[in-house]
Amino acid sequence: MLVSKQGYEIPYIYEGKGNEKKIVIISHGFGSSKESPTAVTAAARFNEAGIGAVRYDHPAHGDSPVDGEYFRIENCLNDLESVENMVAERFPGAEISYFSSSFGAFINLIYISTRSHRGTRSYLRCAAVDMPGIIKGWMSEEDIKEMDEKGYLVIDEDYVRPLKIVKGFCEDLEMIDLYKGFEPKGTKLLMIHGTDDETAPYEDSKAFAQLYGIDLISVEGADHRFTPEGAMDIVREEAVRFINKI
């Protein structure tokens, strides 16, 4: 069992033979889980390529035992750090990389920019680089009023489980602007984004990539979940190529 800095369990799954020289930490998106099709199939493809994979749940997501009171940016960063430390202890000498989607990519970018870390490569699928703007655009006037009155909202939009968002989470987002002062600190990055992403705008990732000189793979016609035929195959194959690149 992996225990967070706050004392709750961080559910995770390791997939591999146990002797891999490369391990990828897979983090999921907002309202999703370690059991998402993206996370599961990416881990399987990494295994086929001889790369180990660890996928885990953010607080209040998937099998996490805590509710939205713990879904705060600091806890998300701490949990990623805990997962990474576990991987480093369990697989000493293995090269660590990241595969993250949407909100998970947002967390990963903050993490490598603000904390000491071991990951040498970060592969970012449909990165929600402007998560504060996405949440603002999503919330209606009624949502804002409810948040002010109750201090939280509960969202259930085809999510794995209803997600409680507290006012403090929104305040956390207000303090973050990845377009200002992002530092990769030696980690190599590659972004991939669908041009028809309806959730995390493609133009946001394009602007971010241009600002920091990051390579961006644009997949024409792909939405946020990369549902067009063959689109997710591109995601997986480019991920393996990037992680294995010398």
Image (tube, rainbow, N blue to C red):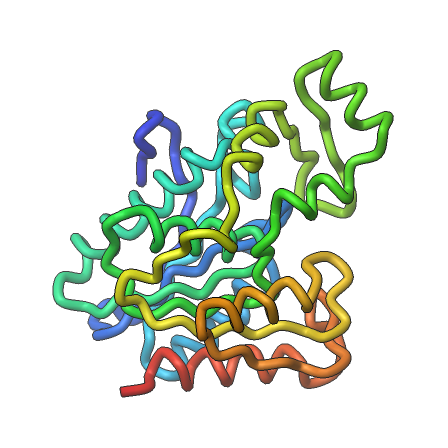
Residue found at x 35% / y 38%? 78
Observer able to see residue 15: no
Front residue (pair 17, 172): 172
Residue 244, image quadrant: bottom left
Residue 192, image quadrant: bottom right
**30 displayed left or right of 182:** right
- 157 relative to 99, above or below: above
Q: Residue furthest top?
A: 149
Observer able to see residue 216: yes
x and y, in percent, of residue 75 in the image: 42, 34
- 165 relative to 96, above or below: above
**Quadrant where the C terminus is found in the figure:** bottom left
x and y, in percent, of residue 10 in the image: 40, 39
Front residue (pair 221, 54): 221
**193 displayed left or right of 117:** right
**Quadrant where the N terminus is found in the figure:** top left
Residue found at x 49% / y 83%? 238
x and y, in percent, of residue 212 in the image: 45, 68
Residue found at x 67% / y 39%? 161
Residue found at x 60% / y 56%? 128
The total of numbered circles placed on residues is 0
Front residue (pair 167, 157): 167
Front residue (pair 48, 239): 239
- 66 relative to 178, above or below: above
- 118 relative to 7, above or below: below
**113 displayed left or right of 27:** left
x and y, in percent, of residue 7 in the image: 33, 25
